Every structure is written in structure tokens, then in C-alpha cells.
């Protein structure tokens, strides 16, 4: 089987490299700006600093009917537009969404009602140094699971992924993994982006109060969505602390997007908390959401949620 990666950015190219290193066949579905250009091999800088040339097959939307398995690595706000271009995708082709944030899968399900729809949650780290040069910055876990009934028979996909990525596991409740990741992102990303700090600086005493207030708001909203599967607040605090420590020298993805004048995933992270807060007050989350929107100026995501 050939994997097709939609989203030849930081994570998509690193995943291409890791899959190719294990002999998997990989095609890269490219955006329009790459059409008509020479496509060099991509260069992967591995965790040990080695440079490796990775061959993959360039593809464009007119090749959609040949796609056997689609891994989607665009930003959350790009997923729907990117998939709309693939209208000839066979109904049997599984679509695996790997973006951060929530609120996109429902739209994809409406666009492709018959395709197996899966989600993936990955804690690998990747940076794009420039087009076709990417750095693998951290090895993490990857979880895959079904978002609709048609996807439930695709658990065999984790085997080759596990070989290539070091860890990959199937979860029948992938939505829970997605919500747990979102809860972490909803605390770290807006705070680091608004304050122009690394993840580790969040542990400085000057951020203790705001970190605690935001964690409380995010925990209350997300634990209500998790119902009887909700973790305790202490478990959430420990998990948050662990991610901050493990990624202490990193700039969060939202910090990087803002710093480079790119659109952010604010709508799908803090926006998701606001959209699901119901009657619960979320003043800190709301202020941070507004501040990120203000700082990113007109560079707004194309699709907006209701809240
Ligand atoms: N980077 C990381 O370490 C991690 C990222 N994530 C999540 O993974 C997702 C991807 O992140 P990241 O790789 O950093 O993002 P990037 O912005 O580096 O990559 C996104 C890629 O999607 C491509 N793209 C956008 N629209 C289209 C389209 N219509 N057709 C084809 N390609 C398109 C862009 O192409 P082009 O620029 O060529 O036009 C870009 O290369 C995000 O949701 C992020 O939050 C999760 C864990 C870790
Ligand atoms: C875990 C964290 C916060 C690491 O920086 C991340 O996922 C992100 O930056 O989006």
C-alpha cells in the first residue's frame, strides 16, 4: 500500500522521512504553489543531526482517485479546503486527520460521508527549516483510532506506523486522546504566544496565577466533555507540568505561527473551549483568545466556529 501525505510541511515531511526509512511507499500531495516546479528530494535532519535525502512521489489533486490511504498533516484551518480539492478520492480510501485542535472532523465527515475517517494524535516534534528541509526535533507517541463506523476495520494501519515511528497504538476512543491533547494545547499555546515566551518559562512564578486560572477553566470544560472518562484535576495538572518540562526549551506552535505572521490554530484550540463552555465562565481563556486574534491581525483562519 502507498501512503499519501497531504500537507508537506514540518510534520508531514518528517513522517514521510520516517516511513521511507522503513521502506514504505509514500506520495506527497502538494499544494498549488508547487505545481510546475522542480521537486527536489526532501532533506530530513534526524534526531541525531544526520542529514538524509528522502525520495517521495509528488502528487496533485487530479491524482486523488489513485490514493489508497490519506494522512492529513495540514494545519487545522487548512484541512477542509485541502480535502475539497480531492473530490475524486475513492470512497474506500481512509482519511486520517492528524492536526492539533478540534472541530474539523465533523466538516470532513460531511464532505466524505462514506470514507473511513480516522484521527491521529502525535507528540513527535518537527520544524520546517525551509521548503524541503525539515528537522525531526522530538520522538513521541502516535495514537490512531476511528471517528466513524467505516474506520473501525483499519486498526492494522498501526503496525507499519509503529515500525516507522517507534510507537503507534490503536485506541477505540481516539476522541478522548484528542481532547486530552487539546486541553494541554489550550493552556500552553495561547499563554506562550501572548507572552512571547518558551514553554518552560510558564513555570516562572510570575505566571503561576494565570497558569492556575487557565488550567482550571480548561479542565472544567474538558472534563465535562469527557464525562465518566475524565481524569482528576490533579492528574491533569501533573500531565500539564510534565509536557511543559519535556518541551521547556520549545516555542509552542502558536508562538511560532504568531512570530512568523502566519494564521494560528486559535479557533480550533481556545475557540473550541469557548464553544463548549456552556454556562461556565472562562474569562482567561476568552481574553487570550481575543488577544491572539488581535495579534494575528487579518491573518484569520478561513473557517470559524460559533461561540
Ligand atoms: N510541527 C510539529 O511538531 C507538530 C505539529 N502538529 C500539528 O500538525 C499539523 C501540521 O503542523 P506543521 O507540519 O507544523 O504545519 P506546516 O504549516 O509546517 O505544514 C502544513 C502544510 O500543509 C500544506 N497545505 C496547506 N494547504 C494545502 C493544500 N490545499 N494542499 C496541499 N497542501 C496544503 C502547506 O503547504 P505549502 O506550505 O507547501 O503550501 C504546509 O506545508 C498542525 O495541526 C500542527 O498543530 C502536531 C504535533 C507536532
Ligand atoms: C505540546 C506543545 C505545546 C509543545 O510545544 C504543542 O503541541 C504545540 O506547541 O502545539
Image: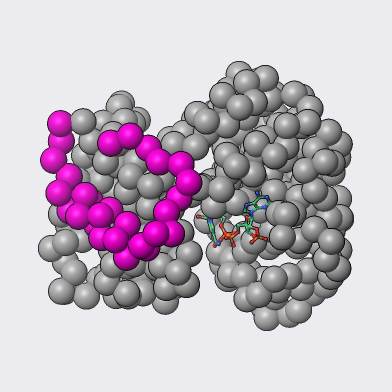
Q: Which residues are magenta?
A: 279-307
Rendering coords of residue 186 (x, y %): 33, 52
- Name the residue at 31% across, 30% down: 225
Determine whether 65 is above or below 11 in the image. Answer: above
The image quarter containing residue 71 is top right
- Residue name at image x 59 percent, y 66 percent: 126
Q: Is residue 189 magenta?
A: no
Q: Position of residue 291 (x, y in %)?
A: 25, 60
Residue located 80% across and 58% down the image: 35
Front one among 112 and 2: 112
Residue sitting nearer the eye, 3 or 144: 3
Residue 163 visible within the image: no
- Image coordinates for residue 166, horizontal then vertical, percent: 67, 56
Splitting the image into four quadrants, where does ligand 1 fall? bottom right
Quarter occupied by the C terminus: top left
- Image quadrant for the N terminus? top right
For the residue pair 16 and 18, the one nearer the viewer reads as: 16
Q: Position of residue 299 (x, y in %)?
A: 43, 59
Q: In this view of the protein, which residue sits in the foreground, 112 or 21?
A: 112
- Residue 189 figure quarter: bottom left
Amino acid at each position: 500500500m502507498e501512503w499519501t501525505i497531504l500537507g508537506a510541511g514540518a510534520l508531514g515531511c518528517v513522517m514521510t522521512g520516517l516511513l521511507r526509512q522503513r521502506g514504505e511507499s509514500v506520495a506527497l500531495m502538494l499544494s498549488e504553489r508547487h505545481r510546475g516546479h522542480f521537486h527536489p528530494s526532501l532533506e530530513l535532519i534526524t534526531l541525531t543531526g544526520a542529514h538524509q535525502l528522502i525520495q517521495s512521489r509528488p502528487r496533485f489533486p487530479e491524482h486523488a482517485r489513485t490514493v489508497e490511504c490519506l494522512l492529513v498533516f495540514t494545519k487545522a484551518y487548512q484541512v477542509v479546503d485541502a480535502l475539497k480539492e480531492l473530490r475524486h478520492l475513492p470512497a474506500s480510501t481512509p482519511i486520517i486527520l492528524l492536526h492539533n485542535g478540534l472541530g474539523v472532523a465533523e466538516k470532513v465527515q460531511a464532505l466524505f460521508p462514506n470514507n473511513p475517517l480516522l484521527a491521529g494524535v502525535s507528540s513527535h516534534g518537527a520544524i520546517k527549516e525551509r521548503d524541503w528541509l525539515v528537522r525531526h526535533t522530538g520522538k513521541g507517541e502516535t495514537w490512531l483510532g476511528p471517528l466513524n463506523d467505516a474506520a473501525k476495520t483499519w486498526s492494522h494501519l498501526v503496525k507499519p506506523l509503529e515500525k516507522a515511528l517507534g510507537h503507534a497504538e490503536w485506541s477505540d476512543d481516539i476522541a478522548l486522546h484528542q481532547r486530552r491533547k487539546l486541553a494541554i494545547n489550550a493552556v500552553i499555546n495561547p499563554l506562550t504566544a501572548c507572552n512571547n515566551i518558551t514553554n518552560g518559562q510558564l513555570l516562572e512564578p510570575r505566571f503561576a496565577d494565570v497558569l492556575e486560572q487557565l488550567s482550571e477553566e480548561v479542565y472544567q470544560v474538558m472534563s465535562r466533555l469527557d464525562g465518566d472518562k475524565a481524569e482528576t484535576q490533579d492528574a491533569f495538572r501533573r500531565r500539564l507540568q510534565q509536557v511543559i518540562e519535556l518541551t521547556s526549551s520549545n516555542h509552542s506552535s502558536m508562538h511560532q505561527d504568531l512570530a512568523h505572521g502566519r494564521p494560528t490554530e486559535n479557533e480550533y484550540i481556545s475557540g473550541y473551549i469557548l464553544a463548549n463552555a456552556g454556562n461556565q465562565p472562562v474569562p482567561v481563556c476568552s481574553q487570550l483568545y481575543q488577544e491572539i486574534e488581535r495579534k494575528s491581525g487579518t491573518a484569520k483562519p478561513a473557517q470559524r466556529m460559533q461561540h
